[in-house]
Image: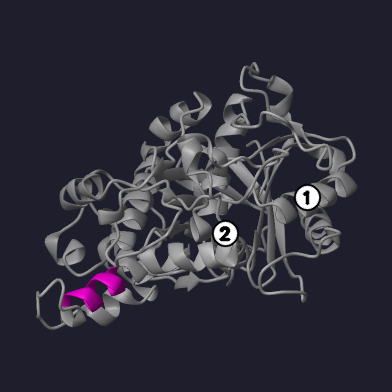
């Protein structure tokens, strides 16, 4: 008999790996301190030669990924998967260990049924960096390597391996799914995991997102769209969401994973909930592949749907982790939507100013930070805004703000909006 339909899911574990560091604790401390991972990248780090005036990015150190993945998983796993998969596995393993479902060197050891534990990953681009390098190895005379592609090239490139490798590594036999809704992929994965728990299909899920988009082709593509900041001279300060002089986003890399469970499942094994994913919503703009409606109407509708689904009133929202890309049009239409739906103007964060735009991982990263905000009463402060855009009119989280106990009793909204018109919103409350 299927378990009773659930209204929400509890969060029992968190994992995080970004260009600022590995682990929730390190990232949280550095974000609160206002550290930026954005740098002007050396041209030689890109597999394909590129001639661009923009080389800004927030990259995860490849040597650090390699060092950690070799300690964390068997050779049979790391040797048959790409770096983007390695980054996801590191975040997922941290989340499992934090939830008490895996020790540092063992398979899942809690009472959760592996057949009723699912894997839900959001990713926009897959292992495009691996594909670029394979192309160069085989076809570019300049490199003169002249070897065939790897025997595992296809499974290493396919984004489905993100879920497949984690399933193989952990022995989890529930649904193992990958979602691509561009920049909202991480939020989509969390929504789908929540729905599966609510429907009684699974009792537990590892859900989140990952992206490593800093490759020559992707960088050039975003530049040609006019989406990137061109302020190389600003370096770490180049990403400026909601600033009057913002000029685009900076690409970043990262991975985040949350363990979601039925409350009864968590209680049965003595797990301590960190927060509750109360609900969320997804909608489509039906407008453009590259931008939201300028009046913010569809974003506003998505937020209202999420509030209704979570059975929360607008005034229950105490803080918002915005999409906040730093592009002139998107920030403005997002602000219009927020001011329409949340006229009490809760404080907002814009983490892309420090981490860059991590595409499919962005909303999952913000979801982890939302849980930390509920636990501590401290939001990640907004940085790099020297002159707030009066056309946005948002209440930006202050860099020197004190912990707010009242915030722990309210809801935190995480929103994400993507190329293709994919909108998503999530609502978290304290346990």
Dot 1, how many residues are within 10 Å of its Cα: few (below 14), some (14-19), or many (20+)?
many
Residue underneath mark 1: 332
Q: Earlier in the sequence, mark 2 or mark 1?
A: 2
Instruction: Kindly identify the residue that appears in the image at 58 percent across and 29 percent down.
Output: 375
Tag on residue 190?
A: 2
Dot 2, how many residues are within 10 Å of its Cα: few (below 14), some (14-19), or many (20+)?
many
Q: Note whether residue 356 is visible.
A: yes
Q: Position of residue 240 (x, y in %)?
A: 61, 40
The secondary element bearing badge 2 is classed as helix
Compared across the picture, whether 226 is left or right of 390 comes to: left
Q: CA distance from mark 2 to mark 1?
A: 26 Å
Q: Which residues are magenta?
A: 130-137
Discs 2, 1 touching: Cβ within 8 Å: no
The secondary element bearing badge 1 is classed as helix
Q: Position of residue 7 (x, y in %)?
A: 70, 56
Q: Position of residue 15 (x, y in %)?
A: 41, 45
């Amino acid at each position: 008999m299927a378990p009773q339909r659930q209204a929400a899911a509890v969060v029992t574990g968190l994992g995080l790996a970004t260009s600022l560091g590995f682990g929730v604790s390190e990232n949280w401390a550095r974000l609160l301190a206002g550290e930026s991972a954005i740098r002007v990248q050396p041209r030689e780090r890109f597999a394909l030669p590129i001639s661009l005036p923009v080389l800004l990015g927030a990259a995860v150190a490849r040597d650090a990924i390699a060092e950690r993945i070799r300690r964390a998983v068997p050779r049979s796993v790391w040797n048959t998967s790409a770096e983007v998969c390695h980054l996801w596995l590191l975040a997922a393993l941290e989340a499992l260990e934090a939830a008490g479902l895996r020790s540092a060197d063992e398979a899942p050891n809690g009472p959760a049924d592996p057949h009723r534990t699912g894997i839900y990953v959001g990713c926009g681009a897959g292992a495009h960096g691996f594909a670029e390098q394979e192309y160069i190895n085989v076809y570019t005379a300049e490199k003169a390597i002249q070897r065939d592609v790897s025997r595992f090239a296809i499974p290493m490139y396919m984004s489905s391996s993100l879920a497949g490798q984690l399933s193989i590594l952990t022995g989890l036999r529930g649904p193992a799914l990958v979602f691509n809704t561009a920049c909202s992929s991480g939020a989509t994965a969390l929504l789908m995991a929540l729905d599966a728990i609510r429907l009684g299909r699974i009792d537990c899920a590892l859900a989140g997102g990952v992206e490593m988009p800093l490759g020559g082709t992707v960088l050039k593509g975003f530049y040609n769209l006019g989406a990137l900041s061109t302020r190389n001279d600003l370096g770490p300060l180049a990403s400026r969401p909601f600033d009057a002089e913002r000029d685009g986003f900076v690409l970043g890399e990262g991975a985040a994973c949350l363990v979601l469970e039925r409350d009864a499942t968590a209680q049965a094994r003595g797990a301590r909930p960190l927060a509750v994913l109360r609900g969320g919503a997804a909608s489509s703009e039906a407008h453009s592949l590259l931008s939201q409606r300028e009046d913010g109407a569809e974003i506003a509708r998505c937020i209202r749907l999420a509030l209704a689904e979570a059975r929360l009133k607008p005034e229950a929202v105490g803080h918002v982790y915005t999409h906040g890309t730093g592009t002139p049009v998107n920030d403005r239409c997002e602000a219009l939507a927020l001011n329409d739906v949340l006229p009490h103007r809760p404080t907002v964060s814009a983490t892309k100013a420090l981490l860059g735009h991590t595409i499919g991982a962005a909303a999952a990263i913000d979801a982890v930070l939302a849980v930390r905000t509920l636990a501590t009463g401290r939001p990640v402060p907004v940085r790099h805004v020297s002159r707030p855009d009066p056309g946005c009119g948002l209440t930006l989280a202050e860099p020197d703000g004190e912990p707010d106990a009242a915030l722990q009793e309210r809801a935190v909204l995480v929103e994400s909006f993507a190329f293709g018109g994919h909108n998503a919103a999530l609502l978290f409350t304290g346990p």
